Image (cartoon, rainbow, N blue to C red):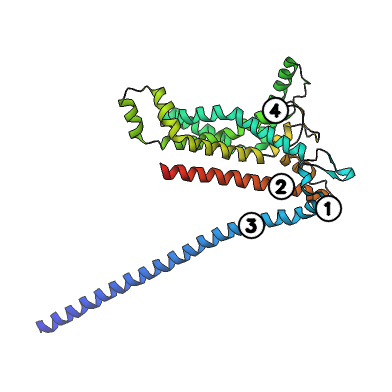
Amino acid sequence: MEQTMSANGFVNLQETTIARKTKQVNRSNNHIKGEKIFKGLLNFAGLLLILVVCGILITLVWQSLPALRSLGLRFFWTDTWNPVTNVFGALPFLLGTLITSFLALIISIPFSIAVAILLGEYFPKGGFSNFMRSTIDLIAAVPSVIFGFWGFFVLVPLVRIFEIKIGVSPNGLGLFSSALVLAIMIIPYAASLGTTMIKMVPSALKEGAYALGATRWEVLRSVILPYSKSGLFAGILLSLGRAIGETMAVTMVIGNSNDLPKSIFSTGNTMASVIANEFGAATDHVYISALVEMGLFLFLVTFVINWIGKAVIKRFSKNG
């Protein structure tokens, strides 16, 4: 009797063990299936994103073909833009884009680096750091049209007063006003990336410099900035890409003139602003194609700038 009960208990134990292992195997199989499905969704999302970017590029190239055939490369160095006579030259807008973007970059670099050093080295934590980060994030998140309104109602009158004092035509609107607005808009991009790169400087390097008797300024100048210069440069490049493609804020304060700019205080247009202003009113096939061609140029320039910036960041991360 006892032997029979022991045998039954042993059989039940085996059945319980087998059932438990079967559940574990089924659960593992379900996990494997779930991981495969998730991996497939990720691959699909990545492939879809690549297809969307390629589709945008193909569309821009296709729609630019009439202008490329009709105008050729002289489109980029012709200084006259007159849709009425079908004369299309992008040189005024190319110069407007370059002047506003690089002037904004020159203005923003000292502030971007200063903020990056402040948050990355002097105040990496604490209430003041959190407040500054929130402010920078807010500036980056504010819609560009809000910057355009602020520039038009606040900055343009101040620029007009400044122009009167230096003896130039008091337009207020123009390339200089656009550059000032852009400078404020792009500071968060370089500052945020610069802060991250400065925090990545190894503590051993800084402590070694302090051990040799270096002051905080000497450590900053001789250790932190040289080590993080590639990352800071990448942040500046990404800011440039942001400035080149900005549309709404620039359109509201640049003056929207199709003439070749004679100085930084002249009114003008950028490639993005002229597209925003005239695309809705364009009817001629070549006219539309010329605007799309400028969009293609902006797309390629922005892609190259961002690619270089990402490559620099990747190299910095590997070296770090």
Question: Where does the image place residue 15, in percent across and percent down from the top left?
Answer: 24, 78
Corner quadrant of residue 213: top left
Image height of 282 relative to 177, above or below: below
Corner quadrant of residue 173: top right
Question: Where does the image place residue 303, in percent across and percent down from the top left?
Answer: 61, 47
Mark sitting on residue 177: 4
Query: Is disc 2 placed on a helix, strand or loop?
Result: helix
Image quadrant where one finds the N terminus: bottom left
Query: Is disc 4 placed on a helix, strand or loop?
Result: helix
The disc labelled 3 sits on which kind of residue?
Cys
The disc labelled 2 sits on which kind of residue?
Gly
Residue bearing the label numbered 3: 54
The disc labelled 1 sits on which kind of residue?
His
Left or right position of 257 against 113: right
Q: Earlier in the sequence, mark 2 or mark 1?
A: 1
Residue bearing the label numbered 2: 295
